[in-house]
Image: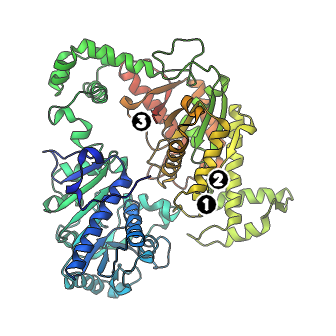
Amino acid sequence: MITKVELKSFKDISYKEAGIYENTKFEKIHNVIFKNSDYASIVIAQEIATLIKEKQVKQNYCVLGLATGSSPIKVYEELVRLHKEENLSFANVIVFNLDEYYPMERTNVQSYHYFMYEHLFNHIDILPENIHIPDGMVSQKDLHQYCIDYELKINAVGGLDFQLLGIGRTGHIGFNEPGSHPNSGTRIITLNHVTRSDAAEAFFGIANVPKRAITMGIGTIKKAKRIVIMALGHKKAPVVKEAVEGAIKSDIPASYLQEHKNITFVLDQEAAGELTRIKTPWLVESCIWDEKIKNKSIVWLSQKVQKPILKLTDKDYNDNGMSGLLAEKGSAYDLNISMFNKLQSTITGWPGGKPNADDTNRPERNIPHKKRVLILSPHPDDDVISMGGTFLRLIEQKHEVHVAYQTSGNIAVSDEEAIKYAEVVKSMLLENVGSINIDVILAELKKKKENTIDSIEIRTLKGLIRRVESLGATRFLGLPDTHVNFLDLPFYETGTVKKKPYDKNDIAILTKLIRDIKPHQIYAAGDLADPHGTHKVCLDILFKVIEDIKKEEFMKDCWIWLYRGAWQEWDIHDIEMAVPLSPDEVLKKRKAIFFHQSQKDNVMFQGDDTREFWVRAEERNKDTAKKYHQLGLTDYAGIEAFKRYYF
């Protein structure tokens, strides 16, 4: 949990304490990198609050340009807290929102009008007449003049004092897609396919995403007196590098912000991952060759020159900016041997520890030989998709394995799948299943309109579908039903992509399970790239539980292993346990995934990757194995990777 901070701006931050790194000569936009994105959001909110107060003292309006999307949500939460707990008034604030889908009803839950009222305006004392959000239902014939008038309204109040932005994977700011002119004003624009794909999960499929939007122009944005642009998550890393380090070009609209004199790019570590000073700091200036940087650089060098680690030479190190490492740590031979042994020691066929074996250089302890293992799966298929082979090994090696599905996963079941299962039940002459009336559900599903929220009855049915599929997979792997837990954490149960903040009820459910099992190992999803955020919330709940109970006696023997899901894998230098898969285990993992039939052929939330989850998982495991082999290690059919979380 993040405590409130007393900061006026980014210039007041202690870089060391806040976990922020200063920028370097390669970067053309001032940026700060936070270890904790929640903290970053609080700092932004504090800067906005300070500006509002300064304007109040002068009896002036504070004109804010605001953005939507997942990135600024925590900023708005903190502004609401400041209003409710510290009496921050918004009576002198005028707001202009960046954009809106077109056409789009204000009452539609996907509209940015709905978003802003839900997250901010309904909870503060801003005057209704001071709220300006593009109208997604203005008539086509009036649209041109409407956009001109929007610009005139901004100019009439003296322009924007502060503009909050996000950045899309196309480099768009607002909805200014590639090709936008640097002097453009408010206008209608056609959305890029990538932008629509990124929005698809909120609209239950890309076909439902509007193709056009009204957006404030780049020229309008650039006139703001102060700009803060947020980017969070690994998917934003490539475009952040382009915007911050690349040339100014229309292909990356955010790059035009290099010309602004008062801008800060706010990043988390994953979004900053491709910046030169983060990815390859040894190419920027002299660096401190700690263990992490050393390991990262040697893996990078091996991949760059396309040589196994043991074949790297002094010349390879010197020619690629790593002469300082040689001078400090010794010859290429010594470095190569040390790194090769480190990578080799991560590989184990015994994820629960090998009995009666020296565990000095193994990822896991050998004692106790039989461990209590808890596998946490945010959705009902993450366990087999992400670590199905390891799951199988743990069972076969006689550990006491438990799995807990943290959410029902009901929102990921399509209406078509629900109808199919409901009709199967009805055909078996089962008119009622528990409290569910199949006839009522079928009638409701068949007349249901697009983008409407499922009733509790439909969500219950869809949740049951995910349960039955999960039990099929765990039975196939050999796990007793008594060791399968369905937590149905309350934060998830909204019927929409947007979830509630987790609270004491979610924490209590997971706390009880962990206390009951007293595990020696917990496997949890460390994949923060999940398109609709469930993985991050589930991980945050786990971290809060650990913080609360870490001093209890059984937790002294508990190790936490983080896996990643269908969207990405750990970097090789970060992997601390690599579990190799044989061809037979790859096939068994595939079959376990196939039990999740509702997710196989009609994936609702797959991002812009059109491959089915089982294909992604298999190819990711093969790619990890290939990378290990190219570094000079044994060639396996696949590898599942884990990183330990230390508490």
Query: In the image shown, does 107 or 6 lie closer to the viewer?
Result: 6
Q: Are marks 3 and 1 in contact (CB under 8 Å)?
A: no
Q: Are marks 1 and 2 in contact (CB under 8 Å)?
A: yes
Instruction: Specify whether 230 is left or right of 316.
Output: right
Say which residue appears at 60% left-offset and 37% top-offset: 375
- Say which element carries label 1: loop
The amino acid marked with disc number 2 is Asp
Indicate which disc, 1 or 2, sits on the residue closer to the N terminus.
2
Query: In the image shown, does 140 or 569 lie closer to the viewer?
Result: 569
Q: Give the CA distance from mark 3 to mark 2.
A: 28 Å
Instruction: Specify whether 642 is left or right of 194.
Output: right
Q: Position of residue 210 (x, y in %)?
A: 43, 70
Visible residue check, residue 251: no
Question: Is the residue marked by circle 3 packed among few (<14), some (14-19), or many (20+) residues within 10 Å?
Answer: some
Residue 583's tag is none
- Say which element carries label 2: loop
The amino acid marked with disc number 3 is Trp
Q: Give the mark toward the camera: 3 or 2.
A: 2
Query: In the image shown, does 125 or 317 lie closer to the viewer?
Result: 125
Residue 91, above or below 54: below
The amino acid marked with disc number 1 is Glu
Q: Position of residue 598 (x, y in %)?
A: 64, 51
Q: Give the CA distance from mark 1 to mark 2.
A: 8 Å
Q: Which quadrant of the view contains residue 136? A: bottom left
Q: Please, which residue is most extreme toward the right here?
A: 429
- Say which element carries label 3: loop
Residue under numbered circle 2: 488
Residue under numbered circle 3: 570
Residue under numbered circle 1: 493
Say which residue appears at 28% left-offset and 74% top-offset: 64
